[in-house]
Amino acid sequence: MELQLDDPNLSRDRRAELRCSLASELIHKGQYEEAQAALGELWAGAGERPRTEKLSPLVAAEVVLQCGVLSGWMGTSRPIPGAQEKAKDLIFEALRAFQSNRIRQKVSDAKYELGICYWREGAYEEARIILREALDGAEGELRAKILIRRTIVENCTGRYHDAWEILREAQPFFENSGDALKGKWHGQLGLVLQRLALTEKREDYVDRAIIEFTAAIYHYQEAGNERYRAMNLNNLAMLLYPIGRYGEAHEALDQAEGIFERFKDPGSVAQVRETRARALVAEGRYEEARKTIDKAVAILEGSREQALLADALTVQGLVAARTG
């Protein structure tokens, strides 16, 4: 696809379509800097509306959509004021264009991305509603991605069995998909099992969750998706330290933090540091935990990731109590 972009005979619309397709693929892999480069002159900056005057209406809508999607994801990895609101504005604009032209699959795609923005802001009910709407008209890989995102919302609101039921129903599709989607399915099931293990005191769920996260890490490595591999390494560590496997937990966290630092993603680095602080508290290493969680909170306070900041502040309060 990148080679096609060098073709001087491409029309303006076709070049923009190729740029959007390549950017979407890179965003899906968590390669946000590369996605910016793929968009080229279409990218005006995080949250900024691209110049689309010379493009046909539907191609312009696709460009606006991808710029909105990328803006939203960039807002999770670094402190960009108003990133999610600006991302939603761009995605809403694209959604209206797709609705007016009755392109059902693209309407579903835009609603899916909009649901992610609401989820990031902690507006779970809005996210749940719009993701349910997004399923109408969604097919193939997009339908699978929407189902996964729905389980994430249910997980965040404590509806773990609802999330598990969605995953069970979707399992046949994911078994026949590529490594990236298999990684999503295993990783999300791992999260559901992790939460159920805590709420229902089920040790067998801990063992199953470790297996699921390990499978997710493998599939993401096969898919070349380092960012999501790192996320699952962090999730794996969350299971290992409570059962006393501290060395393995810190090894997984070292890998995850190294990946996120290479991506220059301070928001995700903060999440890894929060997990490390929890592990250090469990080990009784309170002063190290205090320094670690203070750094994490400082990063997250500069973002609009309210749910993540709330978790980090909770750990900070725990550490403060333990250290007097």
Image: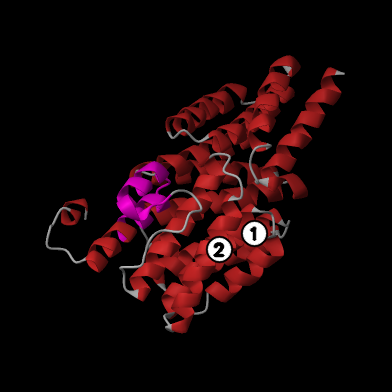
User: Label for residue 153?
Assistant: 1
Which residue does the numbered mark 2 point to in the structure image?
89
Which image quarter: residue 32? top left
Give the Cα separation between the discs numbered 2 and 1: 21 Å
Between residues 212 and 225, which one lies in front from this camera angle?
225
Q: Is residue 228 above or below residue 260?
A: below
Q: Mark 2 Cα within 10 Å, few/some/many (few <14, many 20+)?
A: some
- What range is drawn magenta here? 21-44
| Magenta-span inclusion, residue 56 | no
Q: Mark 2 or mark 1: which comes first in sequence? A: 2
Residue at 41% in and 58% down: 50
Where disc 1 sits, the SS reads: helix
Q: Is residue 11 above or below residue 231?
A: below
137 relative to 164 in the view: left or right: left
Give the image location of residue 98, x and y in percent.
44, 77
Q: Mark 1 Cα within 10 Å, few/some/many (few <14, many 20+)?
A: many
The three-letter amino acid code for the residue at tag 2 is Asp
User: Label for residue 16?
Assistant: none
Predominant SS along the magenta part: helix
The three-letter amino acid code for the residue at tag 1 is Val
